[in-house]
Amino acid sequence: MNTNFWVSKKVLITGHTGFKGSWLSLWLQHLGADVYGYSSPVPVSEPHLFGIAQVAKNMDSTYADILDFQRLQSFIQKVRPEIIFHLAAQPLVRESYIDPVATFSINVMGTVNLLEIARHTESVKVVINVTTDKCYENTNNSIQGFMENDPVGGSDAYSASKACSEIVTSAYERSFYSNSGKFLSSARAGNVIGGGDWANDRIIPDIIRSIINKQPLNIRYPQAIRPWQHVLDCLNGYLLLAQSMWESGAKYIGAWNFGPGESSILSVAQLIEECNKHLENRLNVVYESNTQPYEATTLVLNSDKAAKLLDWNIMLPIHQSIEWTMEWYSCYMSNRLSDLTLRQICQYENINASRL
């Protein structure tokens, strides 16, 4: 990534108060971009990285509903961004079983609103819709990685809503963005770990809550297999894609996978064991035996396209990703966090630079 590219670029991030959004906002501020955020009024979790890392200090934020078309339109037309990362979403599978209507509304119509407004905003050149690896029609839980041209779909409201968001993105690109001077893509990743994630029903936050609350760690699917990656590796892919779209246009439109290779694939039980290596006391793990809502047991991405065309690769191997993540939470729990979030960004940049 050419870090100088981002200096003074006007970048809008929807969902900037979330886990990924906070890391991305902080990183872009560090790179010298003019960063703007549009997100729901209150972060979903408490505590939240957005507040802990003081992300709001150096950016212009508006707190409103992504479904409020007029409010979103007014903000985008006022800000006049050049690059948009659309992260605003209902991001949890289990929550989608509780409130499927809100999940479909936010994840589908929120995308429609953003893309419709962006196409009528002259300043906008690049839009990336951030979705998920769960957008694929995963009927056989295959260990073979999904490729970008595989069918999308979903057996739960969350996965289906993200598949719909992908279909919306493709339709808008072909109907409205093609040959318009604007470039639209989607980015698919999942099972991202890193400091500052406090969402419910995610394994690392659940581990940290069990430690803080001195309660057993309840696990639903210990044998579920996932390719785990650090949030900075994931975001590096988004940044590389946006830069390439800006500089080379139509060559980089479409869907992109950003997932780690086979060496980063661990079961939930294996991930817990790796986290245990960084804890003073071993976790007390309880495996739930009652019937749980459906979730895919295996989900892997093929990211050869990003490796070949964007020169994107994982910089942090799985064990280092876990080490950085657990270091962040350890410092948080011992009141030694200080500016660790930004320091990890700088460390990552140094590792990335040494690769070139």
Image (cartoon, rainbow, N blue to C red):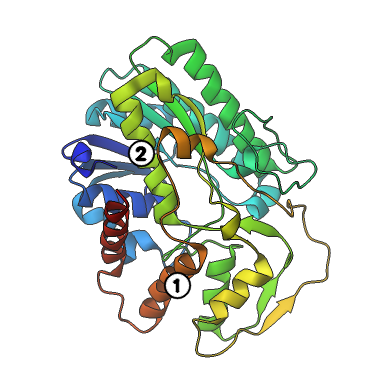
- Tag 2 secondary structure: helix
Q: Which residue is mark 1?
A: 323
The disc labelled 1 sits on which kind of residue?
Glu
For label 1, the SS is helix
In the foreground, 97 or 22: 22
The residue drawn where x is 73% and y is 41% is 138
Distance CA(mark 1)–CA(mark 2)? 25 Å
Residue that badge 2 annotates: 240
Who comes first in sequence, dot 1 or dot 2? 2
Q: Relative to residue 163, is residue 251 depicted above or below?
A: above
- 322 above or below 113? below
Q: Residue at x 38, y 21 (%)?
A: 183
Q: Nearer the viewer, residue 224 or 43?
A: 224
Residue neighbourhood size for the residue with mark 2, other residues' Cα within 10 Å, grouped as few (<14), some (14–19), many (≥20): some
Q: Quadrant of the N terminus?
A: top left
Q: Picture coordinates of residue 209 (x, y %)?
A: 54, 76
Q: Residue at x 53, y 47 (%)?
A: 259
Q: Residue at x 59, y 41 (%)?
A: 302
Residue 265 position by quadrant = bottom right
In the picture, measured across the screen, residue 245 lies left or right of residue 136, that is: left
Q: How many marks?
A: 2
Residue 349 x %, y %: 28, 55
Residue 350: % across, % down: 26, 58
Q: Is residue 322 left or right of residue 124?
A: right
Say what amino acid the circle numbered 2 marks. Answer: Leu
Q: Is residue 125 visible?
A: no
Lateral position of residue 314 relative to residue 351, left or right: right
* Residue 160 visible, this angle: yes
Q: Quadrant of residue 297?
A: bottom right
Between 186 and 104, the one lying in front of the other is 186
